Amino acid sequence: MGKRGPKPKPPPVWSAELAYGIGLLVTDGCLSGDGRHITLVSKDIVQLENAKKAFNLKSAIGYTRSGYDGNLCPRIQFGNVTLYNFLLEIGLMPNKSKVIGSLKIPDTYFFDFLRGHLDGDGCTYSYWDPRWRSSYMFYTVFGSASKVHIVWLRDEIRRQAGIEGHVTGKGKARTIYQLKYAKKESLILLRRMYYRKNSMHLPRKRLKIQKMLSIVGEQL
């Protein structure tokens, strides 16, 4: 009898960690065209370590040349046909940046996914508005090159959190789209995303959020 190939890996089981990892992949990851390999690139080593935990990986962190400036950038790359097919089924695809749309994320884990999305390609920022005395503004922002994806994200957040947000284009050709939530809505959203202190997250971003909220006497 011939040698048997390796056993196929069991299909992923939804969890808060898996949903968070998918949020990272949607923003900073890619599926290769070979039907097997998955890559995540980030300048933040902690983010790659989080991805390894989310997908239960033993892969070492390597380096690749950045397509923007040619500098070396940390990455993880691994092969997993079962996970690859699972990601296709929920809405990811190769060369996804401008064409990704809606995703099949269970409601139970949507805000874990959203936290990964924020850690991957989102941000928060704040400032004192000079037009009004003692007026401190802060925003939570999600970004994507796909308007369809950003509109889906807004619709899901509206359905599950009851807040509106607004979508804007960015760049000379309006090729990047941003979904923004201002002060009151931002606070609602951040509390939904950071509902547990020990949830998987990027510490530097959470610390920035905590400092931002402390100015108005709020906390996560």
Image: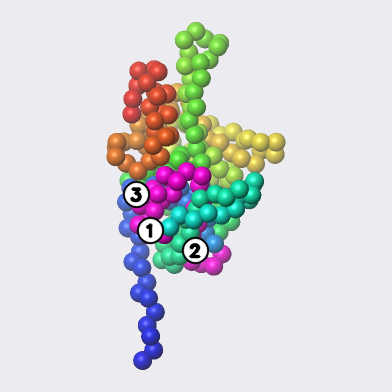
Question: Relative to the observer, which residue lies in front, 94 or 46?
Answer: 46
In this view, 101 is above or below 2: above
Residue appearing at x 48%, y 20% in the figure: 137
Residue 7 appears at what percent x and percent y? 35, 74
Residue 187 appears at what percent x and percent y? 39, 27
* Residue 1 visible in this rendered orientation of the protein: yes
> Residue 84 lies in what quarter of the image?
bottom left
Q: Which residues are drawn in magenta?
A: 33-59
Q: Mark 3 is on which residue type?
A: Glu
Q: Mark 1 is on which residue type?
A: Leu
Residue 30 appears at what percent x and percent y? 53, 55
Question: Relative to the observer, which residue lies in front, 169 or 202?
Answer: 202
Q: Residues within 10 Å of mark 3 (few under 14, many from 20)?
A: many
Residue appearing at x 62%, y 35% in the figure: 169
Residue 114 appears at what percent x and percent y? 42, 42
Q: Residues within 10 Å of mark 1 (few under 14, many from 20)?
A: few
In this view, 84 is above or below 170: below
Report the residue that reaches farthest toward the top.
133
Q: Quick one: SS at disc 3?
A: helix
The label on residue 17 is: 3
- Which residue position holds label 1? 57
* Residue 21 visible in this rendered orientation of the protein: no
The first of marks 1 and 3 along the sequence is 3
Q: Mark 2 is on which residue type?
A: His
- Give the distance between the C-alpha atoms of the residues marked 3 and 2, in whole angstroms: 20 Å
Q: Quick one: SS at disc 2?
A: strand
Report the residue that reaches farthest toward the bottom.
1
Residue appearing at x 65%, y 41% in the figure: 175
- Which residue position holds label 2? 37
- Give the distance between the C-alpha atoms of the residues marked 1 and 3, in whole angstroms: 13 Å
